[in-house]
Image (cartoon, grey):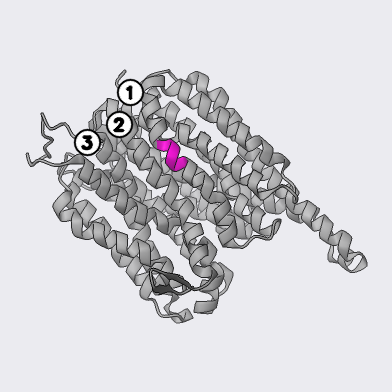
Amino acid sequence: MVENNSQQLRDEKGKPYHRSAILALILLATFAGTLMQTSLGTALPTLMKGFDIDLATAQQATTWFLLANGVMVPISAYLATRFSTKWLHFVSYGMLLVGIGMSYFTPENSNSWWIFLVGRILAAMAVGIMMPLMQVLILNMFPREQRALAMGISGLVVSMAPAIGPTLSGWILDKNHIVLGITITNSWRNIFVIPLIIIAIAFVLSPFLMKDIIPSKNVKLDVWSLILSCVGFCLFLLGFTNVADNGWGDMKTVILPIIVGLLILIVFIWRQTRLEVPFLDVRVFLNKNFTLPSIALILVTMAMYGVEMMLPTYLQNIHHMSPFESGLTLLAGALTVGLMSPISGSLYNKVGIKRMTFVGFLVLAAGTLPFVFLSSSTPTILITVLYAVRMGGVAIVMMPLTTSAMDALPTEKSTDGTAANNTLRQVSSSIVVAVLTSMTQNVINNNTPSHHFQKADPMAYTQHVLSASMDGFQLAFLTGLIFAVLGIFFVIFLKNEKAGDR
């Protein structure tokens, strides 16, 4: 990214700033935050043993992170408009630092588990602020013709960190390692060390590098909107999160939270349309050029999770891989995203969103189709290549679609647009994870023979269980393919605009 030295950039207070330095800072901090989203997935058995807790309790480390993160994303629009960009980043980095530190230093006993969870919630709240802020800053710092490339570079970090997280955790927990003469033990605490160091650096640098770039206004907080947003999104996401453990028929933990949460969110949306200065301006969805790319983003998110969610479990249960080995298999996809994101951002400026989206969904569908026919004997190298291909398709469309949606709005609406866009993706990912998990588990349960058959013919029973598992995974992969194909047909509704056409 080249600075325009002939016309020095200045913030809201007239002070000069270097956008490359700010971009590097927010990418560094966001990398630390997104590492925290997925790093504990492979560490649950270790946490169960260390804290002497059961699986349901250990899963709270992930569940409460997702809930707190989802609740904060809509609130980020108000925070970005109301408070100084510089100090909002400083506070969010501080929250992340404290949150990671609390989890890291939690004593290993069941009575102290709540401290670990509070740390996770604080970290999630910080990430929920940082992610939308990163996009808003890019939209405010870069002209339209340069946004796609900048968003592509940010996509490199946002997409790679969650994929690197499980692999890094698996490597740490696998055994003790010696790196540069330093012994890294296989303790769960070491999962937090790298993010802790990174965010500490960002926290120290932010007062010097960050500037007040996003225009701030003395907007009055609508307390009812805040309450409706927090309670509505929390209940709605909590209901879908509980599906994996309790199934769709559980009234208390699934059906009731989803229905009540949805009703509260409907009231929240209605209230926003009545306020002169809304807490979150949902009227951005009246802009067709914003809404259509946002819907396409939901489709690519669901298509991505159709395989990404179930593939590690497939590799561990069917191919008997360790968490570290399954993470390595997925790492090629993360590297492909990292390579393709800046390239797709650059191509968007030349090719246009319609062609980019068509090619991306086509690659995604082509890479997903073979997953429907996977078996227990499919070579790992083939799975690795196919996963890399489909993630290349995701990279081709993800950030260009985000850029196209945000380009449809005036810059002063970027905070509302970013929050609305990220909220949609958060909700859609929670829904598709719940649907895929329940579908897969139901197919496995319905096709698994009774235990009486296990005593009569153990070999045949094992084969039937394997076949039932494959049926469940293939259904999940087929669902991902359907969303990719829907994306191909959805392209006809998009205009083939390039950066700067509007």
Any part of residue 150 in sight: yes
Distance from Cα at disc 2 to Cα at disc 1: 8 Å
Mark positioned earlier in the residue sequence (2 or 1): 2
Residue under label 2, please give it.
147
Residue 214 rendering spot, x and y as whole percentages: 19, 40
Q: Secondary structure at mark 2?
A: helix
Q: Secondary structure at mark 3?
A: helix
Would you say the magenta stretch is mainly helix, strand or loop?
helix
Q: Which mark is residue 295?
A: none
- Among all residues in the image, which is located at the extreme right? 456
Distance from Cα at disc 1 to Cα at disc 3: 15 Å
Quadrant containing the N terminus is: top left
Q: What is the magenta range?
A: 337-341
Mark positioned earlier in the residue sequence (2 or 3): 3
Pointers 1 and 3 in contact (C-beta within 8 Å): no
Mark positioned earlier in the residue sequence (1 or 3): 3
Residue under label 3, please give it.
141
Name the quadrant containing residue 351: top left
Count residues near mark 3 (Cα–Cα under 10 Å), then give few for <14, some for 14-19, many for 20+: many
